[in-house]
């Protein structure tokens, strides 16, 4: 499909025909497959846009494929524009006569940062051309350094020849001339190179200085050698200025060689000598200290300082100090040489590491970021090594080439990172636009779902955090835009949150007022808490802030409840005496439960019941009060010398008990909760009767006694109903025999109720409840064990035919023992009879337990026979006799198991 249709506007039918029936497809999968087939024909951008516009309404899944193709076309178009722009810049750099290496490197860096496709043509070719030209310039610069070193070496060769016989110098003259001419040729070639104008400005002066120094030395060497040749041929010719050659020619002429006369040292002022000695000795001490510590770089500086001191004060100091100084300089030179050797060794290690970055086993290749860090570390180490020793250009060339080769991996990684950064930037910009659009849409249409509103904001924040990595500069540009967009979107929620915070602070103050009140109003607290929960559910705020507000709101209410709890505990403390009695009784019951003695358990249960009813405490109080009253009356009797009658003693004890009850009831009533009732007060004086309701029914008048004989509670249960009523018109039974009437309020003041026991504390209540439950379970367990042992004894007596082994009637059970045990004993004592199969079946029918499979037919037959015998007693009524019949028969294990199963059920009924 070409782009010829791009300028047209198509309807749905035309688009359906162009896309191969995508719009008329029955299913979404079919529609997507047809869209993929259509996209393989590379349709135009306008047609893609038209299809996407129409298809996005009908099927977003298929439209996504079209949108991806549109995005890909946009990206490709943008990449083409970027490629053309940076290709123009690269071509301009290549065409320039004087290329700056920094500009070439900046082009590659800026192009990658801008997202230009450096891995595609034509940028790939231009990048290679720029790299080749930069490499050529760097090679020129490197060759300049090599030429400089070669010039130094040639000068050193000439200096060495000046220390040898002149004949050796004459023999090496031609070789030296060839080397010097070759050096000049190479230097001229470097200057004539096309890229020489692009070389760094510091390199041409270096090459010119090396050429000038070499030519000066070479010309002086040639002139001195010519003089030596002439002096050798003519004895009157002047001698050359080279001392070694001059001495050799003097010896050849027969002229004695005189050693140069030493000039006597002039006398020196002692103060000047002392100052010179001190200066030299200080420099010497510094050199010796640096050499001893192995500081190569510091020792070089100290040695230079010592040399300067010797130049200045060498003629003043004595010979011994001078020799020490020269020895120290020699040691410093050795240390410097060792430092140079160590530096070369470190450089070789760094070269090996740099070359090994790419020579790694398969599957262990280094990534881009790690490669970049490794190269940076290696170059830093190289710089540190160069600072401590003389540079080594040969090793540097190998090291630099290995690093440049490894840097290609970094370049590829950087290109990938830049491309991803550009994509992430576009995604973040799209997210910012989406947030702005969402904010504008929600300004006009807001609902009450603020939690959903907040959730969407959090989702936007998560998408921003997961938007991928971008550079710091790009992030600094995008972050203010994002903050402004999200602040604009969150403005309605923030305004509502401000109102909610004000309302919550007001509720906190209200909670403080409620908590500080002397009487805690539970209904007001509940209503306030419900308002808080409604506010919390309606308006979401930050979790930490909400927790702080909730803590501030809850604190005064919790303090109020804590005060109430403290008051309750204080009230419960006053009831500690009775609680202790109940706790002691509960512990005694638990101990009895652990002992396994049924009698002890029942006794402990009775003691606990008595403690719960307050009997033990009341008995103790009566005893104590009686003893106190008797002691008081005894003292009074002794004072008055009058005997104390038993009646007086009883009345006094009763009064003391009443007084003690009255005194103890006041604090109990003040401290206990809800169920504390004070003892009955003294009977008030009866009020005079003013009027009495007219009621002439029998028994209604207090002075009229009720007729004897009453009626029972249920209708029809009266045996003498007619007699008691006295016929139809007879009077009803008097109320005196029926009990007090509901509406009889005349004698209500005479009623005496026992004071209700105070409510137990939580610990005592739980202890007595658990102890009673454990006691009941223990009794049930003991009963079951006793029942099982009784059955075992019964079967043993049957097996051994010994009635003495039968369990007692109490062990068997009160219901069955009285009438069945004698019969069973007689059956066991007698001789064994044939097995009573029918009796065993009747027992199983009485107990309603299953019968073994081999006896099912016999049981069914017996059931049919029993149906025909209506007047015969049922098996449930004759199970005692049936059991005796079975016990009278022979013992076998199968029948014993069946009998045991039956009796387990029947003896419990």
Image (spheres, grey):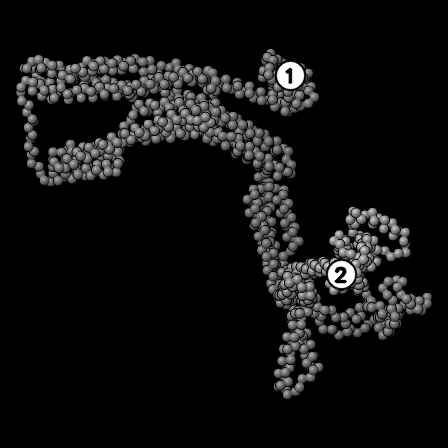
Task: Name the side, left or right, on which 332 lies relative to 588.
Answer: left
Number of the label disc, if any, that sits on residue 894: none
Q: Answer few, some or many: residues within 10 Å of disc 1's Cα (few below 14, many 20 plus, some between 14 and 19).
A: many
* Mark whose residue sits in front, 1 or 2: 2
Quarter-of-image position of residue 749: bottom right
Give the structural element (helix, strand or loop) at label 2: loop
Q: Residue at x 59, y 58 (%)?
A: 563
Residue 254 percent across, percent down from the top left: 4, 19
Residue placed most toward the observer, 593 or 355: 593
Which residue has dot 2 on it? Answer: 801
Which residue has dot 1 on it? Answer: 19
Residue that sits furthest to the front in the current view: 831
Residue 81 percent across, percent down from the top left: 49, 18
User: Quadrant of the image for the N terminus?
Assistant: top right
Q: Is residue 631 visible?
A: yes
Q: Is residue 135 above or below residue 742?
A: above
Task: Name the side, left or right, on which 668 lies relative to 142.
Answer: right
Quarter-of-image position of residue 334: top left
User: Count of labels shown?
Assistant: 2
Quarter-of-image position of residue 592: bottom right
Give the Cα distance between marks 1 and 2.
105 Å
Residue 150 percent across, percent down from the top left: 25, 19
Q: Is residue 116 above or below residue 617?
A: above
Q: Residue at x 44, y 15 (%)?
A: 125
Q: Residue at x 20, y 14 (%)?
A: 175
Residue 297 percent across, percent down from the top left: 26, 33
Residue that sits furthest to the top in the current view: 4
Task: Name the side, left or right, on which 582 lies relative to 291.
Answer: right
Give the structural element (helix, strand or loop) at label 1: loop
């Amino acid at each position: 499909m070409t782009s010829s249709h791009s300028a047209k506007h198509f309807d749905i039918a035309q688009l359906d025909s162009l896309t191969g029936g995508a719009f008329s497809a029955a299913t979404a999968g079919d529609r997507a497959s047809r869209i993929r087939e259509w996209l393989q024909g590379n349709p135009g951008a306008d047609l893609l846009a038209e299809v996407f516009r129409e298809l996005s309404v009908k099927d977003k899944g298929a439209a996504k494929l079209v949108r991806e193709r549109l995005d890909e076309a946009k990206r490709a178009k943008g990449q083409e524009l970027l490629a053309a722009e940076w290709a123009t810049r690269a071509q301009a750099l290549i065409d320039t006569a004087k290329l700056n290496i920094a500009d070439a490197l900046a082009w590659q860096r800026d192009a990658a940062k801008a997202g230009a496709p450096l891995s595609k043509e034509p940028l790939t070719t231009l990048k290679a051309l720029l790299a080749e030209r930069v490499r050529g310039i760097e090679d020129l610069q490197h060759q300049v350094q090599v030429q400089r070193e070669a010039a130094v070496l040639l000068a050193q060769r000439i200096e060495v020849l000046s220390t040898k016989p002149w004949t050796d110098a004459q023999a090496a003259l031609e070789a030296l001339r060839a080397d010097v001419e070759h050096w000049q040729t190479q230097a001229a070639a470097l200057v004539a190179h096309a890229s020489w104008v692009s070389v760094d400005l510091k390199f041409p002066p270096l090459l010119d200085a090396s050429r000038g120094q070499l030519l000066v030395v070479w010309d002086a060497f040639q002139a001195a050698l010519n003089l030596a040749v002439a002096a050798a041929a003519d004895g009157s010719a002047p001698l050359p200025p080279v001392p070694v050659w001059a001495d050799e020619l003097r010896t050849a002429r027969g002229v004695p060689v005189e050693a140069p006369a030493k000039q006597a040292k002039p006398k020196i002022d002692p103060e000047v000598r002392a100052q010179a000695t001190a200066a030299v000795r200080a420099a010497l001490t510094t050199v010796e200290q640096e050499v001893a510590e192995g500081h190569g770089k510091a020792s070089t500086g100290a040695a230079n300082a010592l040399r300067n001191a010797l130049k200045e004060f060498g003629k003043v100091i004595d010979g011994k100090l001078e020799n020490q100084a020269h020895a120290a300089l020699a040691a410093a030179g050795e240390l410097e040489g060792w430092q140079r050797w160590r530096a070369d060794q470190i450089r070789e290690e760094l070269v090996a590491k740099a070359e090994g970055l790419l020579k790694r086993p398969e599957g262990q290749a280094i990534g881009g970021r790690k490669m970049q860090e490794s190269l940076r570390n290696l170059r830093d180490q190289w710089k540190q090594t160069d600072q401590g020793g003389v540079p080594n250009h040969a090793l540097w060339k190998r090291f630099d080439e290995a690093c440049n080769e490894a840097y290609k991996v970094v370049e590829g990684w950087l290109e990938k990172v830049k491309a991803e950064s550009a994509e992430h930037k576009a995604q973040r910009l799209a997210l910012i636009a989406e947030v702005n659009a969402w904010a504008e849409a929600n300004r006009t249409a807001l609902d009450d779902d603020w939690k959903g509103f907040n959730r969407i904001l959090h989702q936007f924040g998560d998408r921003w955090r997961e938007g991928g990595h971008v550079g710091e500069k790009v992030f600094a540009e995008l972050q203010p835009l994002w903050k402004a967009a999200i602040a604009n979107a969150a403005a309605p929620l923030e305004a509502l949150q401000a109102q909610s915070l004000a309302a919550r602070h007001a509720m906190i103050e209200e909670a403080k007022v409620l908590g500080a009140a002397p009487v805690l109003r539970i209904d007001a607290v509940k209503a306030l808490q419900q308002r808080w929960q409604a506010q919390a559910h309606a308006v979401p705020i930050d979790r930490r802030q909400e927790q702080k507000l909730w803590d501030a709101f809850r604190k005064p209410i919790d303090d109020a409840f804590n005060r109430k709890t403290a008051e309750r505990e204080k009230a419960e403390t006053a009831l500690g005496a009775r609680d202790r009695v109940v706790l002691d009784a509960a512990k005694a019951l638990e101990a009895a439960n652990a002992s396994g003695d049924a009698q002890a358990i029942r006794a402990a249960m009775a003691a606990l019941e008595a403690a719960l009813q307050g009997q033990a405490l009341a008995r103790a109080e009566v005893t104590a009060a009686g003893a106190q009253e008797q002691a008081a009356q005894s003292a009074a009797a002794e004072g008055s010398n009058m005997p104390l009658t038993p009646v007086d003693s009883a009345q006094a004890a009763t009064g003391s008990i009443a007084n003690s009850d009255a005194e103890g009831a006041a604090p109990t009533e003040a401290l206990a909760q809800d169920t504390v009732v004070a003892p009955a007060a003294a009977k008030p004086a009866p009020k005079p009767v003013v009027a009495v309701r007219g009621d002439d029914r029998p028994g209604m008048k207090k002075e009229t006694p009720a007729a004897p004989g009453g009626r029972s509670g249920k209708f029809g249960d009266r045996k003498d109903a007619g007699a008691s009523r006295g016929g139809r018109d007879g009077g009803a039974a008097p109320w005196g025999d029926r009990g007090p009437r509901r509406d009889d309020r005349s004698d209500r003041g005479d009623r005496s109720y026992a004071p209700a026991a105070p409510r137990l504390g939580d610990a005592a209540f739980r202890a007595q409840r658990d102890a009673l439950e454990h006691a009941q379970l223990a009794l049930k367990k003991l009963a079951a064990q006793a029942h099982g042992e009784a059955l075992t004894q019964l079967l043993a007596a049957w097996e051994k035919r010994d009635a003495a082994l039968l369990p007692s009637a109490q062990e068997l059970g009160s219901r069955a023992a009285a009438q069945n045990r004698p019969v069973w004993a007689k059956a066991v004592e007698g001789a064994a009879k044939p097995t009573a199969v029918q009796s065993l079946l009747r027992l199983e029918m009485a107990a309603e337990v299953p019968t073994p499979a081999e006896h099912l037919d016999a049981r069914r037959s017996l059931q049919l026979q029993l149906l025909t015998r209506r007047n015969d007693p049922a098996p449930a009524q004759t199970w005692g006799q049936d059991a005796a019949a079975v016990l009278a028969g022979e013992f076998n294990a199968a029948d014993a198991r069946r009998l045991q199963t039956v009796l387990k059920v029947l003896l419990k009924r």
